[in-house]
Image (spheres, rainbow, N blue to C red):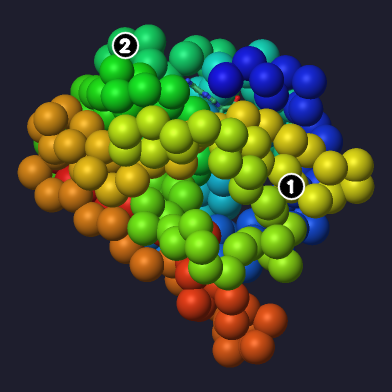
Amino acid sequence: MGTQYDGIGQSYERLKREMPLARGPERATFEALTSEVEGRSVLDLACGTGWYSRTLARAGAASVLGVDISEEMVAAAERSEAREPLGIRYEVCDARLLDTVGRFDMVTAVWLLCYARNRLDLSAMAGAIYDNLARGGVYVGVEMNPRFDWSGPKATAYGLTHRPDAEFPGGKELTVTAHVDPPISFQACFWEEEPIVTALREAGFRSVEILPAVLTAEGEDAFWDDFRANPTIVGIRAIK
Ligand SMILES: C[S@@+](CC[C@H](N)C(=O)[O-])C[C@H]1O[C@@H](n2cnc3c(N)ncnc32)[C@H](O)[C@@H]1O
């Protein structure tokens, strides 16, 4: 599921700039959960083209290391770093296989757990996150809402469709399409709350919270009614 991004690369950032879900609640949720990043060392897993790695560096992180499985996404991140140097380092690695590369104050991962295909993948990701945190360090994630009501309002108005392809205990296999021009589709998994919380607890985290997404001021608008009724995304915070 990871290397599918090799065909996407730089064009992925259109999605960040144009898609209401990414411009609105995804970004607001990430920024709210990382508001204390100033002076902290951060490992940004599944960093993609470095969109949020750059957010963290600009917010004053002491250091940022971005890691992603896709060579093409990391190459795009490195081109951005060359254009606008922020002191971010990038590496290509599968988060499931990542050794302890540091003891970071914070590990961020926006859309990582959804690429776990089974519970073993989830455990490996949770273990890598845990092992790379200093004691007291915090994991911040943004993922699909584990309590998403599949018969409720969808995220289509916000630029994303989720087509369930298969079910398994604790989740679903999905084809996700971002409706930018041209559309970008990828395979991912929807995970219920129990497998996510279990993987993080078994990795050793002493507190695990699934937090409601944050809507910005524009969230007052009726445009976001469907999102408020059935939020597509959540924040995750866990403390080592
Ligand atoms: C939807 S993108 C999110 C990128 C970035 N976090 C953002 O929000 O802009 C998902 C990223 O996860 C990466 N990915 C998928 N599986 C991975 C794995 N096992 N280890 C590391 N990265 C992975 C993909 O290559 C892709 O860049």
Asked whether mark 2 lies closer than 8 Å to ligand 1, one says no
Q: Residue at x 65, y 88 (%)?
A: 222
The disc label shown at residue 99, or none? 2
Task: Provide the secondary structure element on which disc 2 rests.
Answer: loop
Amino acid at the residue labelled 2: Asp
Farthest residue to the right: give it: 181
Mark carried by residue 6: none
Label 1 is placed on what type of residue? Ala
What's the residue at 23%, 44% (across, down)?
194
Which percent across, then down, holds residue 26? Answer: 55, 59
Report the residue at 52% width, 68% height from top. Answer: 152
The x, y position of residue 141, in whole percent, is 39, 46
Task: Compare residues 17 and 223 and report the one nearer the observer.
Answer: 223
The image quarter containing residue 135 is: top left
177 lies above or below 232: above
Asked which quadrant contains residue 126, the reply is: top left
> Residue 160 or 202: which is nearer the viewer?
160
User: Quarter containing ligand 1?
Assistant: top right
The picture places residue 67, in percent across and down from the top left corner, at 50, 23
